[in-house]
Every structure is written in C-alpha cells, then in structure tokens.
Image: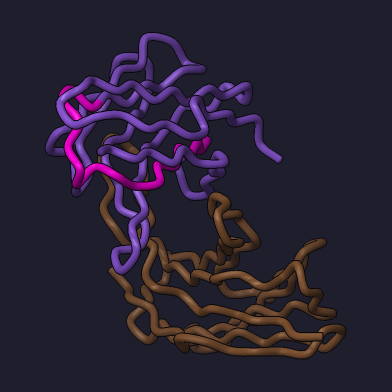
Amino acid sequence: DAKTTQPTSMDCAEGRAANLPCNHSTISGNEYVYWYRQIHSQGPQYIIHGLKNNETNEMASLIITEDRKSSTLILPHATLRDTAVYYCIVRVGFKAGGSYIPTFGRGTSLIVHP
Amino acid sequence: DAGITQSPRHKVTETGTPVTLRCHQTENHRYMYWYRQDPGHGLRLIHYSYGVKDTDKGEVSDGYSVSRSKTEDFLLTLESATSSQTSVYFCAIASGYGETQYFGPGTRLLVL
C-alpha cells in the first residue's frame, strides 16, 4: 500500500490560500487520494478525494500531479476555523470484509493566524 | 453532517468496571468502526463491522468487544476497564466499500 509524507506543521494568514502538500510516490494506479481534517477535540472530517483529475468541492480543491506521486490540498480563503490537523491518505491499511480501512498518520497541523 | 451520535460523550469510571459506549447512525450505512485516539498514537482501529452481526478486529482490539444487532447501532464494551483504556473514542460510518468515512463527535473516557 502506498504511504504518504506530509509536513508536520504549516501556518497561513487568514484570508490567504492554504496549500497543503502530500507526497505519495508509491501510489498505484487504482488508489485514490483522500483528505480528512480534524479540528481540535472533534472527530475527523472528510474533505475531498480524487484519482487523477483535479477535484473541487465547497470545502477545498485537490490538485494531483500528472504522475500522481504528489498532491496538494488547497483551502482558497483560509479562516481561523480551518486551523486543524490535515490527513492525506492513500487507501492504505487493509481490506477485510469488503471494507478499506484507512490508516491515519500524523498529518499536517495547520495554524491559520489573523 | 452525517447522522452519527455517540453516547455518553464523557464518562469517568473506575478500574475493573464494565463500560459500554454506543454509536448510533441514521444513515443506514453498512460499515461502522470504533477507533481510539491517544497523544502520540493518532487514530487506531479497535473493531469494525461490515453488517449486522458481522464484526472483525482492528489493530488494538485486546480488552474490547463489540456487538451490532441492528444496522443503526454499534456497541463497544470494555469488559473490565483499565487505566490504559483512558482515551477518546470515535465511531465512524461508511457506505460503499468504506472508502469515505464519517466520524462521530467522540466519547472521552477516563478510567481511574
């Protein structure tokens, strides 16, 4: 299974774009890239996922490089409420009983400051 | 937000007592999961369920049991709580093949 590498921490000014990188150089052709975030004391929250095309939803954009070895999660106008730990997951873990079990690593701690 | 609730949200108990945590969903999703989260360890899977009465162990299942007698409820039981089980417990649900998970608000358990 592909593993991911993310910076431990990042910071961003409120109102600016936050660009969170993720390396997944061993990703295989049928593996999706998923992003979750966890705001302090809350459960993780699904953000977005993609296979090879760029994706956008109401929360964020996901840019995947053409070789699929890395991706970037973009929060276009970061707010203080976006301060959280962001997890990049490439369907790692095991598949049993028909369910993929994602493995949450350490993620990137994003601090958005005024 | 996905319809997931956990109860209780906070609990303090003593070593050796049994504890049951409940996860309830209103989404009719097939998959349900119990995780624990501790500083320095991140999220770790305890047990999961892929259908009514179908459950399997995760990476940290020792000391825990689960039951799922109906689609909407997934119970996590600590038969005899220990201080090492002090943690924050999260329930999650998923449809399809479980690719996208939706998490509950968590239960903070303190075992004295």
Please state if B72 lies on the left or on the right of A100 as rendered.
right
Residue drawn where x is 66% and y is 75% of the image: A62
Between A99 and B33, the one nearer to me in the picture: B33
Residue drawn where x is 27% and y is 38% of the image: B111
Asked if residue B92 lies in the magenta stretch, the reply is yes
Q: Position of residue A58 (x, y in %)?
A: 82, 61
Stretch in magenta: B78-95
Q: Position of residue B81 (x, y in %)?
A: 20, 31
Between A26 and B28, the one nearer to me in the picture: B28
Please state if B109 lies on the left or on the right of A14 as rendered.
left
Q: Colour of chain A?
A: brown
In this rendering, does residue A69 appear at all?
no
Residue drawn where x is 57% and y is 52% of the image: A42
Residue drawn where x is 39% and y is 37% of the image: B33
| Chain for colour purple | B
Q: State whether residue B48 is above or below residue A36.
A: above
Instruction: Please tell me how many numbered marks the rendered image carries.
Output: 0
